[in-house]
Amino acid sequence: MGIVDLKVAVLGAGAIAGQHFDAIRRTEGFVACAVADIQLERAQAIADNYGIQAYRDYQELIRQERPDVVVIALPHFLHRETAIFAAEHGCHLMLEKPMALSVAECDEIMAAATKADIRILVGHTQHYISENIQAKRMIESGEIGEVVMINDVRHLNYFQDTRPQWFLEKDKSGGGILANLGTHSIDKIQWLMESQVRKVSAKVSHHGKRGNVEGSGVIYLELESGLPATIAQSGYLGATRNETEIIGTAGMLKLVTGVSLWMSRGGAYEQVDVPPMDTPFELQYKDLLSAIASKNETSCPPVYARSVIEALEAVYRAAESGVEQFL
């Protein structure tokens, strides 16, 4: 542990916690100190693995350990409460997406962060995945000409038995497949094109075998730049798929995030070489460390993450009302 290492605590000992601790271990400037989970045995198992302290109560952890950085890897409905408490205790935040359940909650978190003068990185991992970064470079270089549309498709069994029940209860998760995976798609489109959503239409269905959230949705959106895009997602039984097609005047990209990138200039798709990079989690931690050191915003700040929630709220209003929504 170096003199300037920042102490990091993780709230939540679920599946993603290990990826955070591995990235913390590999990122110079950070050192893990503790983990909290209401299921103490889960926290203890991680604590034993990484040689840190385990807590059941996150508030006790923050008071006792006084971490420099708190990672919030908890169910969505706990983001607001835990983020504000951590901010009030002077902790910088690595906050998993979605930032919060609503724009109003995002605003409360942002107000607490401003008052405490802390940095927040919201974990929109799309910004840190090598295939996405390479696709963005190619778009910006003009290799496929002017982009005229984006079509994003994602299908998987969303109601599988292994999914925790809170994901399927709207008051805890904020919504179904569109709140969880649709926000990735909205974010990816906004980030690739450096333009935010300005209007949306949407249609959803509710045929899940448990819970009260939507199981599929189709979104038509337009960005402030005027670019049109579609998002189609299904959480019912069928073939798993996760592809983003970016169509330009001089070619097309097929982005299989986390897997591969393909380009066509008129013929069949040909695979594009993607330079090796650090893991998305490592890139996030390096981004946060840089922001803390420079006292600047991260490259995925809360004001941006708020825009994704604002777009999601518009999607649900459009689906419920049948009327196009403007942001």
Image (cartoon, rainbow, N blue to C red):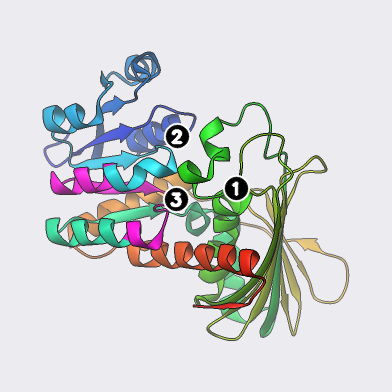
Residue holding disc 1? 176
Q: Residue at x 70, y 77 (%)?
A: 149
The answer to whether 295 is drawn above or below residue 143 in the figure is: above
Q: Which of marks 1 and 2 is nearer the N terminus?
A: 2
Find the residue positioned furthest to the right: 267
Q: Which residue is drawn at 38% across and 54% down?
A: 122
Q: Which amino acid, by three-letter code, is at mark 2? A: Gln
Q: Earlier in the sequence, mark 3 or mark 1?
A: 3
Dot 1 falls on a residue whose secondary structure is loop
Crowd around label 2: few <14 · some 14–19 · many ≥20 (10 Å) = some
Dot 3 falls on a residue whose secondary structure is loop
Q: Give the range drawn in magenta.
A: 82-106
Question: How far is the residue under mark 3 from the one under mark 2?
Answer: 15 Å
Crowd around label 1: few <14 · some 14–19 · many ≥20 (10 Å) = many
Residue holding disc 3? 97
Q: Residue at x 36, y 36 (%)?
A: 26
Crowd around label 3: few <14 · some 14–19 · many ≥20 (10 Å) = many
Of the residues tagged 3 and 2, which is closer to the observer? 3
Q: How far across and down, in percent of the image, does residue 278 sit?
A: 47, 47
Question: How far is the residue under mark 1 from the one under mark 2?
Answer: 24 Å
Q: Which of marks 3 and 2 is nearer the N terminus?
A: 2
Quarter holding the N terminus is top left
Residue holding disc 2? 19
Q: Which amino acid, by three-letter code, is at mark 3? A: Lys
Whether 80 is among the magenta residues is: no
The answer to whether 66 is drawn above or below residue 268 in the figure is: above
Q: Name the one closer to the observer, 31 or 220.
A: 220
